[in-house]
Image (cartoon, rainbow, N blue to C red):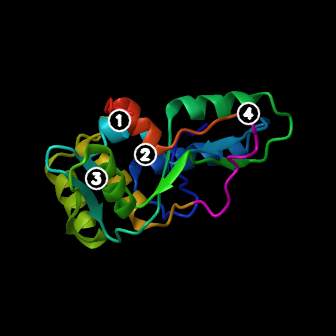
Amino acid sequence: SDYSIDFTNLNEGQNRNLDQRREFHRHLENMPIKATTIFNGAFMDLLTTDMPLILFKQKRILCWGNANQILEFTTTDNVAEFTAAAALDDNTPRFLRIAGDKLSCNDFVQLLSELTNNKYKIFRPGGISLLNFLIKLTRFFSPSENELYPAWQGMQYMRDLMEGRIVFQKYDSDRYPAIKWTSAKDFLIKEMKVPQ
């Protein structure tokens, strides 16, 4: 698995880590190996850690661009289950695309307001063009090219999610029916220890 958002529709040169994955794919295509890549969107687990989408203290949902743009999330456990099933499957295609849940920033506003009994709102500091400018500025002043996830790299991932060009056109989540997909609601209830 690439454990990644689907970069097949993204332009080269916009996300360093995805460019490196793309370069590896070109190498892989010339090898005598039957390969299957599993794209899983963003890891849902990041919602309460490293991804600044839910701003808990401010009761805001960070949004660059369209607040109705669908974002895809899958837990690491679900990705592991699906990957194990695919590894035992002799007939996997070259690409598989899964998502445990699909929500927009507006959906997150409604969900967090419901779970916390606090009124969450959209925080929109600007559009995609401003985010692109901030990425360039951050990379210029703090290149950190040898780090796996410097600040600007995380910003590139956020931009790719918010821009809307990585939403899957076809999902393979039903390929292995035994997998029970975790919704963002169930994940947040568990992580935030919301009383039932």
Mark nearest the camera among 3 and 4 is: 3
Type of residue at label 3? Ser
The segment highlighted magenta reads 168-178
Badge 3 or badge 2: first in the primary sequence: 2
Residue shown at the point (18%, 53%) measured from the top left: 138
Mark nearest the camera among 4 and 2 is: 4
Residue shown at the point (54%, 38%) measured from the top left: 182
- At which x and y percent is residue 126? 21, 70
Mark 4, residue position: 178
* Labelled pair 1, 3 in contact (Cβ < 8 Å): no
Q: Is residue 75 left or right of residue 156?
A: right
Type of residue at label 2? Asn
Type of residue at label 4? Ala
- At which x and y percent is residue 115? 32, 45
Give the quadrant of residue 79.
top right
The secondary structure making up most of the magenta span is loop
Badge 1 or badge 3: first in the primary sequence: 3
Q: In this view, does 84 lie to the left or right of 158?
A: right
- At which x and y percent is residue 99? 57, 48
Mark 3, residue position: 113
Mark 1, residue position: 148
Mark 4 surroundings within 10 Å by alpha-carbon count, few (fewer than 14), some (14 through 19), many (20 or more): few
Residue most toward the front? 196
Mark 2, residue position: 17
